[in-house]
Image (spheres, helix red, strand yellow):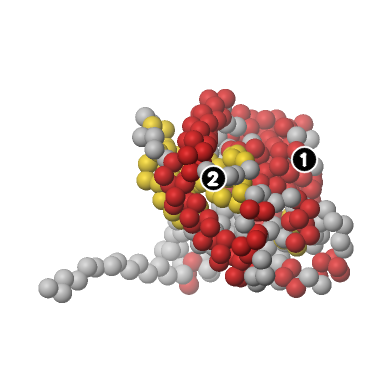
Amino acid sequence: MKNLDIIFNSVLSEINPSVDDIKLIDDIISKLKKLLEISARKLNIKYTKIEPQGSTGIKQTQLKGDFDIDLFIGLDYNLFKHKYKGMSKSKRKKESKKDFLSLCNNWILQSLTLNEFHNPRLLYAEHPYVTVDYLLDDIKLKIDIVLYFDLDLEFIKKNGPITAVDRSPWHGSFVKDELNPDQKNDVRLLKQFFKACYSYGDKSAVGKVGFIGYSAELLIYYFNNLTNLFENFNELHKKPLDCYNRNDKELSKIIHFQNDYLIIIDPIDKNRNVASAISERAYQYCNQKISEFLKQPSPEFFKIKPISEADLSNKRDSILSHTYIVELQNKLVNNE
């Protein structure tokens, strides 16, 4: 596999973040933490920790040019649980959302006072969080500041999380502790490969939802290295990955797993399939590309190229001859 190692090292030299990139993120995080800590003392707000999560945070599995920051603020659940006592899960979720909204509005948004922090805004679907743009000279990046309940791992494994993001810091700790530097580089290579296949993230051109960062990290964890993963990728849809050692029959009895094409069990929560949203088409396309790569290895498979437009005038193609494109244009109508 010496040839593969040469290719992997060549690609890594292009996609690894520089020392300056990492220092820039560290400096911005230090500024943010200082602002939040000063404001929390003034408002007498208690928190357990403020730390960066995600690939640019404690995981350190980011690609070159990936500057976005996820800053997580832990809250002691013991200070809140008396308010939720006796509530159903749905009611508890609504009440915790109110508490998070209050902290976002009255603490986090009010803390972002430096000139380089632009357009701080509150965003949420299920979980409220603050997003702010960092702009200084020619540097531009996005920062998400997220509140969560800082729960013990055993509590999450036994009871599940209280909010949708309570597992995330444990995901970060797991990747930080369980993957060595070589494996983290393999994660970078895998992410780059998925991106080159347009099968990465929640807006995959190939199949709606592709592989996410945590799924890439777990694939390297389960298979130990990228070469081993590539050689076994074609079996992934047949063999569930479960560190709790449950067999196919046991997993098939879990109702919310039954329609999932791939199963990659979250080591933090045995009842969560990290791959539940990954589409079959995204997997099959990546599988085909991995097969082609193993037959004729080349750095070209890791390059993100524009998606070529189909020539619909080619009537000899059985598929294209029955394909049509309709473009619609909105026009403003003046009713005055």
* Left or right of 303, for residue 251: right
| N-term-proximal mark, 2 vs 1 | 2
Q: Categorize mark 1 by other alpha carbons within 10 Å: few (<14), some (14-19), many (20+).
A: few
How many other residues sit within 10 Å of disc 2, few (<14), some (14-19) or many (≥20)? Answer: few
Q: In which quarter of the image is residue 54?
A: top right
Residue 308 at x, y percent in the picture: 47, 52
Q: Is mark 2 on a helix, strand or loop?
A: loop
Q: Position of residue 144 (x, y in %)?
A: 50, 46
- Residue plotted at (77% across, 45% down): 221
Q: Find disc 2 in the rendering and name its residue.
A: 45
The residue sitting at 77% across, 31% down in the picture is 2
The quadrant the N terminus occupies is top right
> Which amino acid type is marked by label 1?
Glu
Disc 1: which residue: 178
Up the image or down, 309 lies above or below 139; here it is below
List x then y, in percent, for residue 297: 69, 40
**Which one is in front in this view, the residue at disc 2 or the one at disc 1?**
2
Asked whether 15 or 179 is in front, the reply is: 179
* Rendered-image quadrant of the C terminus: bottom left
Q: Is mark 1 on a helix, strand or loop?
A: helix
